Image (spheres, coloured by chain):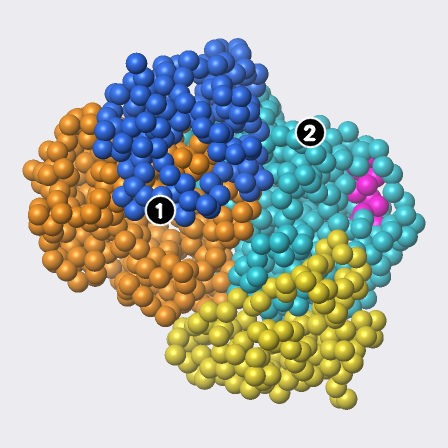
């Protein structure tokens, strides 16, 4: 099943008032249940994690395109004992490779840790934790 | 004299095995200075090894005469660069002890902020800030 | 101009490796530097450069107070210690300083008693320097520590080349066999058997508890000087053939998941190529390797990245023991401090290792698997 | 008394140390600064420090006439909030060979250039960029005391345990303590100190990059302004700034066929004298002198083979006016204890004076990018492109932060 939370706050930079301006559009998009991936306006390169300049053509103009949300599991791990007070063990963390290329760390919502396999097709599923935190998670596709 | 703003914590000293004896003495209202019992040099701040003899076990804490004179001082006149727990204005003095080491501390209630001058003879005294923090201050001394 | 053979490691300074000492990290740093000077046969006042890692607490201003060094001509720090050796070597080779010590002091075993460092104080006080590590894409999903991040890379590697757990077990049995012969390897009193490996509890699948190096309370100092000056010092000098750092596009610290081929450890590849280029040798000329075994499944990956064998053949290479690796039991045995593997490399040159490889001419050291890499090649 | 201690103690100690012979030095005349760049200096950038760092580095590369891919070395402060892996992935540096940091904040302003020069001189890397990016106005303030109260209950380090509990917690106040002792020993008056801030503001009023470009200030304004920490006033403090600066170091041969006239590194030195702390350096034989600046400056002179009197223009690190004023003595630009008289009236440090100093407005009036804007100004002076251009200078002295392990360098055109 999906990752279980304790009553402790989920670690997220916004919690500590830290802003990464280059990934603000990405997280704003998640709030509206859209997966917005950074794309360089001049050379079209897809960039993840978002950054202020394109390493390809050094342009600072970028746009955010909405990803299909489809992808496959590229890797995963399962914690048998919880290393952090906000998460209940055991829980799995997956690395999903989106069709558009970027690889995102996330959690599965409908698959038990032992059933996760590399290559499994998945689809994005948004999970609104509270007003200021919505997370992108994945469910089995097709 | 330094007055504290209620409710704002005062930072406690960083205590570890090297300076525990120094701060334990302060808690018992005794002022000690670190000395290497081999080369007899005094050292401030306290440290684990003597720079002359390169030895660990010769480092001791000996009682200080507690007497010294004001070597330098500053007065916080605005809260811009001050610590929020102290009322403005407050002073901090650098006192050269008879042993030769220099200690930073606030002036005791018997010295007004504008009375401080370089060379002023002073003597150590103690102020119990709260039940687990006692700090040393310096009061007037007839030289 | 190049740094090849210009500098040498002339002195090694250790404190006792322990699982809990009352000495502070300040005392450990002072002791190991003092011992390094003694080992090299010079006085502490001849040291004119101190290089350290930002995560350790005690910078040169503290250590000078306990060593009575009048003035330093060189001091630097680096994140994850990846540039420390290059700092020391370039300081000496460029004629800026004579004797530079790279020192580490860390209470890894009693980490609650560790002293603050800029980096840790910033993290504990929620200071915005945490933006150094892009945690917004990892921590909200529970990926919160290096073992989990590393497991993500290792899982992919084992799947890509379908590596069996037993093959990863052979890496551990190999390293702990060396560790059992080394009295300083306090975490390995006897070699681990394959059963013990297979029954070891999983921490972050596929990494088992027995595959994770544990912290140690220790101070380790490495004294570097010019090669010709080292010749008339006390010990046989370990001539530094080359040293290098490695970085790669989209690389991070264990979380470089957007690299094209993260399982190939691109930072380690870039570092290894530069090491061989400067030294003018290839992987075949290396007799002994001291590799990063903070998480031992990374060792086969490093063997491939450093060109000892082809992609996917690392586990079989380790299983066949084709190259002596971590001959003092590595960080798995002596505790997680990269410099203790540099010390073992120097022991091999001096012929004082507890598992001395006969005719050990060229020894390679590498660190930083899964993140910014650094490495060294030394010889007699 | 302090004069005797300073001269006798420092010279005897410094000459006694065995140091590498200048003939062995591979940096002198063999390395050069070939490109400089900076973002706009503001009081609220509204940008990430990574974003500004990349802009400054790109400008420095364009200025030097090299591509970003040619950069294979990075040097910055440990305090910098831009981690090497993300600079590599944002600038697209395909072949990074070296990345390191120097600690002690402002004290590293010239040390980063020294380390970069050592790396290019020994062939480890070809083009090393030294950069610093910070939002000290809108973000984390290094010089303030109130930040600590919010999070901590214990002093962050042992040394701070002897000062923070007494409310003695900011660099300005620590410097005020040794500044006052210096004023006491050499009877320097408040009026004399004021001239440093006044002259630097004149320079800033002619420098469009400076934050106080259009804010004049007379000596009378200085005397009437509020005292922040006695003996230092508001106009003695540096200006918290958002911005980034960068400069690129490479070998002298490569510098020949690049876009700009190279500015050669003649000699650079680092220092960390005895009983060293982070500005709370009260347990030295005397605190009426900046040991760190003296040792670093004289190591730079020793390697360069020049003396204080040969220098034509100076860029002295002045986080507070006292830091810059006392550095005049440490660099032998005037007699020990005579800096107060030297700057009185301001003529000696104006553009046609004996020793033009901080000609872009310095950290007090141009910007406070922890010394990197001083390095850029030093390069402009030697290229002849400064807004307050000294008449064809040959040697420029740049120093780094006082009161901490420091550094200094002599540049030549």
Left or right of residue B16, residue A75 in this image: left
Chain on which label 2 sits:
D
Residue D240 in the image: state x and y as whole percent: 70, 43
Q: Position of residue A92 (x, y in %)?
A: 31, 35
What residue is at 77 percent from the left and 41 percent from the top?
D365
Is D95 in front, or is D308? Answer: D95
Q: Nearer the viewer, residue D136 or A136?
A: A136
Tell me whether circle 2 and circle 1 mark residues in contact (CB < 8 Å).
no
D260 w.r.t. D230: above or below: above
Kindly identify the residue that appears in the image at 83 percent across and 71 percent down. Answer: B114
Chain ID, yellow in image = B
Q: Residue beneath label 2, please?
A: D40
Is D202 one of the magenta-colored residues?
yes
Q: Main secondary structure of the magenta part?
A: helix
Q: Residues within 10 Å of mark 2 (few under 14, many from 20)?
A: some
Query: Residue at the location (31% across, 55% down)?
Result: C215
Name the residue that disc number 1 marks.
A83
Q: Colour of chain A?
A: blue
Image x and y of residue D279, in percent: 62, 59
Q: Chain of mark 1?
A: A
Residue at the far right: name it. D220
Q: Secondary structure at mark 2?
A: loop
Q: Within the image, what quadrant is residue C184 found in? A: bottom left
Residue A115 spot, x, y in % from top left: 23, 29
Residue A72 seen in the figure: no
Report which colour depicts chain D: cyan
Query: What tint does the image give chain C?
Result: orange
Q: Which residues are magenta?
A: D195-205
Q: Nearer the viewer, residue B38 or D347?
A: B38
Separation of disc 2 and disc 1 at Cα? 44 Å
Identify the residue shown where x is 42% and y is 76%.
Answer: B53
């Amino acid at each position: 099943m999906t990752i279980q939370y304790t009553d402790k706050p989920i670690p997220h930079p916004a919690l500590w008032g830290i802003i990464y301006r280059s990934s603000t559009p990405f997280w704003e998009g998640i709030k509206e249940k859209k997966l917005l991936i950074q794309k360089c306006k001049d050379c079209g390169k897809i960039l993840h994690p978002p950054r202020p300049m394109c390493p390809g053509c050094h342009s600072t103009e970028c746009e955010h395109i909405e990803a299909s949300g489809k992808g496959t599991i590229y890797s995963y791990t399962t914690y048998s004992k919880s290393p952090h007070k906000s998460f209940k063990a055991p829980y799995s963390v997956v690395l999903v490779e989106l069709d558009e290329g970027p690889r995102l760390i996330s959690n599965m919502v409908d698959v038990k840790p032992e059933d996760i396999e590399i290559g499994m097709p998945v689809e994005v599923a948004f999970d609104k934790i509270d007003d200021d935190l919505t997370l992108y998670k994945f469910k089995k596709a097709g | 004299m330094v007055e504290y703003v209620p409710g704002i914590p005062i930072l406690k000293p960083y205590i570890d095995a090297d300076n525990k004896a120094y701060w334990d003495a302060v808690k018992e209202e005794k002022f000690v200075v670190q000395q290497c019992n081999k080369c007899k040099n005094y050292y401030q701040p306290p440290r684990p090894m003597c720079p002359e003899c390169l030895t660990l076990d010769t480092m001791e804490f000996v009682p200080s005469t507690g007497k010294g004179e004001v070597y330098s001082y500053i007065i916080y006149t605005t809260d811009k660069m001050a610590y929020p727990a102290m009322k403005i204005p407050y002073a901090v003095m650098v006192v050269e002890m008879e042993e030769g080491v220099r200690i930073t501390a606030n002036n005791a209630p018997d010295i007004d902020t504008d009375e401080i001058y370089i060379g002023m003879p002073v003597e150590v005294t103690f102020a119990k800030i709260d039940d687990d923090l006692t700090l040393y201050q310096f009061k007037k001394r007839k030289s | 101009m190049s740094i090849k053979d210009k500098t040498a490691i002339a002195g090694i300074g250790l404190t006792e490796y322990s699982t809990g000492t009352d000495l502070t990290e300040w005392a450990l740093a002072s002791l190991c530097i003092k011992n390094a000077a003694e080992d090299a046969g010079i006085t502490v006042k001849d040291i004119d450069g101190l290089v350290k890692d930002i995560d350790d607490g005690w910078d040169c201003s503290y250590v000078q107070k306990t060593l009575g060094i009048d003035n330093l001509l060189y001091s630097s720090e680096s994140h994850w210690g990846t540039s420390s050796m290059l700092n020391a070597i370039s300081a000496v080779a460029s004629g800026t300083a004579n004797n530079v010590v790279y020192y580490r002091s860390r209470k890894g075993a009693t980490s609650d008693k560790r002293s603050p460092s800029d980096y840790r104080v910033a993290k504990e006080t929620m200071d915005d320097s945490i933006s150094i590590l892009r945690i917004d894409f990892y921590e909200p999903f529970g990926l919160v520590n290096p073992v989990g991040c590393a497991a993500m890379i290792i899982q992919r590697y084992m799947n890509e080349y379908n590596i069996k757990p037993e093959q990863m077990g052979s890496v551990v049995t190999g390293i702990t066999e060396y560790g059992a012969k080394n009295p300083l390897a306090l975490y390995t009193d006897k070699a681990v058997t394959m059963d013990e490996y297979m029954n070891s509890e999983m921490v972050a699948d596929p990494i088992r508890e027995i595959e994770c190096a544990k912290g140690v309370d220790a101070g380790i100092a490495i004294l570097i000087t010019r090669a010709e000056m080292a010749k008339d010092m006390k010990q046989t000098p370990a001539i530094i053939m080359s040293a290098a750092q490695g970085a790669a596009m989209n690389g991070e610290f264990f979380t470089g998941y957007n690299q094209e081929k993260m399982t190939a450890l691109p930072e380690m590849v870039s570092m290894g190529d530069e090491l061989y280029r400067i030294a003018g040798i290839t992987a075949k000329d290396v007799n002994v390797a001291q590799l990063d075994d903070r998480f031992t499944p990374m060792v086969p990956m490093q063997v491939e990245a450093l060109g000892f064998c082809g992609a996917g053949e690392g586990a079989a290479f380790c299983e066949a023991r084709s190259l002596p690796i971590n001959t003092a039991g590595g960080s798995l045995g002596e505790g997680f401090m990269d410099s203790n593997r540099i010390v073992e490399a120097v022991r091999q040159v001096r012929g004082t290792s507890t598992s001395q490889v006969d005719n050990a001419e060229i020894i390679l050291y590498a660190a930083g698997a899964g993140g910014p890499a650094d490495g060294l090649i030394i010889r007699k | 008394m302090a004069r005797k201690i300073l001269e006798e103690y420092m010279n005897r100690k410094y000459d006694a140390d065995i140091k590498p012979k200048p003939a062995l030095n591979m940096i002198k005349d063999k390395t050069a600064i070939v490109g400089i760049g900076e973002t706009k200096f503001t009081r609220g950038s509204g940008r990430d420090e990574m974003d500004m760092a990349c802009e400054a580095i790109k400008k420095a590369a364009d200025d030097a006439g090299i591509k970003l891919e040619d950069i294979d070395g990075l040097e910055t402060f440990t305090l910098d909030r831009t981690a090497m892996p993300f600079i590599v992935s944002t600038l697209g540096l395909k072949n990074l060979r070296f990345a390191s940091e120097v600690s002690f904040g402002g004290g590293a302003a010239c040390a980063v250039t020294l380390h970069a020069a050592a790396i290019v001189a020994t062939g480890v890397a070809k083009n090393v960029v030294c950069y610093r990016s910070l939002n000290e106005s809108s973000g984390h303030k290094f010089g303030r005391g109130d930040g600590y109260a919010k999070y901590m209950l214990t002093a962050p380090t042992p040394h701070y345990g002897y000062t923070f509990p007494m409310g003695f917690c900011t660099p300005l106040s620590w410097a005020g303590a040794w500044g006052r002792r210096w004023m006491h020993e050499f009877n320097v008056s408040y009026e004399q100190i004021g001239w440093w801030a006044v002259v630097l503001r004149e320079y800033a009023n002619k420098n469009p990059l400076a934050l106080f470009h259009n804010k004049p200030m007379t000596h009378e304004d200085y005397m009437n302004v509020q005292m922040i920490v006695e003996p230092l006033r508001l106009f003695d403090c540096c200006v918290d700034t958002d911005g980034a600066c960068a400069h690129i170091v490479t070998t002298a041969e490569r510098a020949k066929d690049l876009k700009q006239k190279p500015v050669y590194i003649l000699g650079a030195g680092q220092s960390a004298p005895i009983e060293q702390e982070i500005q709370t350096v009260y347990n030295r034989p005397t605190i009426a002198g900046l040991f760190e600046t003296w040792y670093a400056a004289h190591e730079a002179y020793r390697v360069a083979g020049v003396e204080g009197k040969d220098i034509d223009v100076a860029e002295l690190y002045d986080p507070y006016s006292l830091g810059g004023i006392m550095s005049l003595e440490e660099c032998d630009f005037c007699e020990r204890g005579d800096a107060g008289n030297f700057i009185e009236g301001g003529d000696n440090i104006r553009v046609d004076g004996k020793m033009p100093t901080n000609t872009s407005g310095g950290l007090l009036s141009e910007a406070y990018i922890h010394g990197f804007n001083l390095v850029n100004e030093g390069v402009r002076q030697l290229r002849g492109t400064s807004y307050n251009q000294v008449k064809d200078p040959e040697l420029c002295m740049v120093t780094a932060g006082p009161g901490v392990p420091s550094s200094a360098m002599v540049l030549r055109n």
